[in-house]
Image (spheres, grey):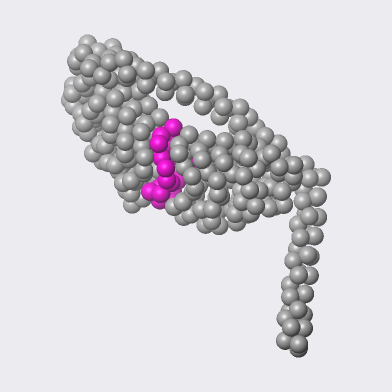
Amino acid sequence: MSDEDDLEDFETDQDDLEREDDEKETEEWEDYRKEGEESEDWISTPLTEDMMKEGLSLLCKTGNGLAHAYVKLEIKDRDLTDIHLLRSYIHLRYVDVSENHLTDLSPLNHLTHLLWLKADGNQLRSARLNELPYLQIASFAYNQITDTEGISHPRLASLDLKGNRIHMVTGLDPQKLISLHTLELRGNQLNSTLGINLPKLKNLFLAQNMLKKVEGLENLSNLTTLHLRDNQIETLSGFSKEMKSLQYLNLRGNMVADLGELAKLRDLPRLRALVLLDNPCTDENDYRQEALVQIAHLERLDKEFYEEEERAEADEIRQRMKEEQEQEAEVEPESELDQSST
């Protein structure tokens, strides 16, 4: 299957899927928020051996191959406030402690074989952990996390921090996060895109923040998908030809009013799908045509793929504009000569 087929399959119902996801996530976030507001003084509920017995599964050989241990633990929604007991379960590789009342994940520092961690819907204020050499997927969604410090796992490929209280991205070191390809920061309080200098990143989700512009992403040469939906972006500065892999850009629900801003996207060599619904500029009569005139290689705008007729008409407009510019360039020197002779 070609890249085009993959992208088409991915995009066919992208906006509908996003709308459903947003609604679902908003409901989840409201549930977590209300639950957190009901009581901040939770009854102390430590993890017990009985809970461990119920939650353990997946018997595997240990590192030396001579013994066996359970490597998966699911202890969701147990009202837990303390997981100190996990310190001694060093063979765990998959841990789900979601929907509890945890404020401290430091016992996980002892789980040096951990591959997968889900800690959504707790009371965490930080995602800080010691460097875990094998951790590949980590999710801290819907907590009360305020920063991105202390995340330095060399094999981490996917990091989910959506629905937190992060204002600024700091501490994400590209020299340490050498495998990170997906970063989810939807639904935070970000007012800047600075600090996301992660050259290996492929998918970046920044919807539902307080962003007014794009900055500091110019060197993300491997980025293919960028979601900026439901922010306050007015200008499309901040994109560069160095973003040579970007194929899908979602700017739905922002504040782009001037169609001329689209010209700033023409240097993105692989941009094929653009979403601009619910921006003021989409009210212009020639909005769809102007987008294609400005970005000749665009294949899809919002939910609709461009037809051959539209593409031919945009080519004609582009050619006419080029000829007019050339004529103006020829007239200017003649005007200067006439002035000098007088």
User: Dividing the picture into quarters, in which one does residue 5 lie?
Assistant: top right
Q: Is residue 293 left or right of residue 61?
A: right
Given the current orientation, which residue lies at the most extreme front position?
Answer: 342
- Is residue 286 highlighted in magenta? no
Question: Is any part of residue 57 visible from this angle?
Answer: no
Q: Which residues are magenta?
A: 182-205
Residue 51 placement (x, y as % from top left): 25, 13
In the displayed structure, does residue 301 sit left or right of residue 70? right
- Residue 159 in picture, x, y percent from top left: 39, 36
* Quadrant where the image shows the C terminus: bottom right
Residue 184 in the magenta stretch? The answer is: yes
Residue 304 vertical position relative to residue 33 in the rendered view, above or below: below
For the point 46% across and 20% down, which residue is it?
27
Q: How many marks?
A: 0
Locate residue 250: give its quadrant: top right
On the image, the x and y values in percent for residue 78 come to: 29, 14
**Residue in the picture at 48% in, 54% down:** 218
Q: Magenta-highlighted stretch: main secondary structure?
A: loop
Residue at 60 percent across and 54 percent down: it is 264
Q: Nearer the viewer, residue 108 or 275?
A: 275
